[in-house]
């Protein structure tokens, strides 16, 4: 699939990333009939990659801290973000879909950059597991969230299959200590990512 590079201004007012170049299109080995693409953003994103990792449920995130490479399992595909601004994406229908998806990711990158300028830093997701979340939940196994146990809820929460707001007891005033526990474990940014809207 030889092709010429396609440069596109996606977010003209973006604070960090505004343009992307489609560098390469190849057949996707993971899914017949689809393509994999290599794209390059107009800026280095190394400083914001750890923050971007906190903008998705931990179960959808594979962050290699040593190399500062983030692979996301989103939009039913793997998308890898590299510090240099390179982005790879598999299981893509066509070039138009690749540009649609990169636009959404570029919005997140710019949001992460704004947070970075305000002093926000990403949390190490590899240290957050279901047990960490479970100890901060009410522990009543009430089933109000739709899960049979608080542990099942914690596991689905980290995979992005549940929202923190679904735990109704957490919204009660006497549960503030549990909410503070979650804030310590997850941080404010990740709590929002996982669907917490507060009391």
Image (cartoon, grey):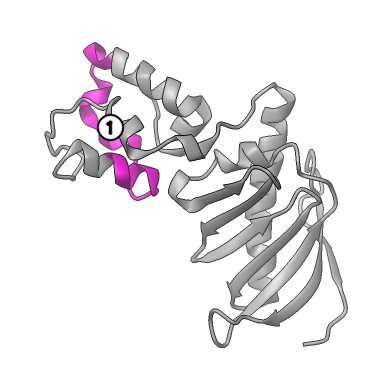
Q: What is the x, y in percent for residue 160?
A: 39, 48
The part of the image, by quadrant, that contains residue 29 is bottom right
159 lies above or below 122:
below
Q: Which residues are magenta?
A: 154-175
Identity of the residue drawn at 84% across and 47% down: 43
Which is more toward the observer, 175 or 133?
133
Which is more toward the observer, 160 or 122?
122
Q: Secondary structure at mark 1?
A: helix
Identity of the residue drawn at 51% across and 45% down: 56
Residue 157 among those drawn in magenta: yes
Residue 120 among those drawn in magenta: no
60 lies above or below 130:
below
The part of the image, by quadrant, that contains residue 113 is top right
Position of 28 compared to 40: left or right? Answer: left
Magenta stretch, main secondary structure, is helix
Which residue carries the number 1 mark?
134
The part of the image, by quadrant, that contains residue 13 is top right
Position of 127 compared to 163: left or right? Answer: right
135 lies above or below 3:
above
Q: What is the x, y in percent for residue 27?
A: 66, 84
């Amino acid at each position: 699939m030889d092709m010429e590079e396609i440069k596109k201004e996606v977010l003209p007012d973006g604070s960090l990333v505004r343009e992307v170049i489609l560098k390469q299109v190849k057949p996707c080995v993971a899914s017949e009939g689809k393509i994999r693409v290599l794209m390059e953003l107009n800026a280095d994103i190394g400083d914001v990659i750890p923050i971007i990792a906190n903008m998705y449920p931990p179960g959808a995130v594979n962050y290699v801290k040593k190399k500062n490479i983030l692979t996301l399992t989103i939009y039913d595909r793997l998308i890898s973000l590299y510090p240099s601004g390179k982005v790879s994406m598999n299981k893509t229908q066509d070039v138009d879909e690749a540009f649609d998806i990169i636009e959404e990711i570029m919005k997140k990158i710019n949001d992460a950059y704004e947070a970075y300028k305000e002093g926000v830093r990403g949390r190490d997701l590899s240290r957050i597991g279901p047990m960490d979340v479970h100890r901060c939940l009410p522990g009543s196994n009430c089933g109000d969230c739709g899960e049979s146990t608080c542990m099942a809820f914690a596991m689905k929460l980290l995979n992005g299959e549940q929202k923190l707001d679904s735990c109704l007891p957490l919204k009660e005033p006497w549960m503030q200590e549990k909410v503070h526990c979650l804030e310590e474990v997850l941080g404010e940014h990740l709590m929002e990512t996982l669907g917490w809207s507060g009391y």
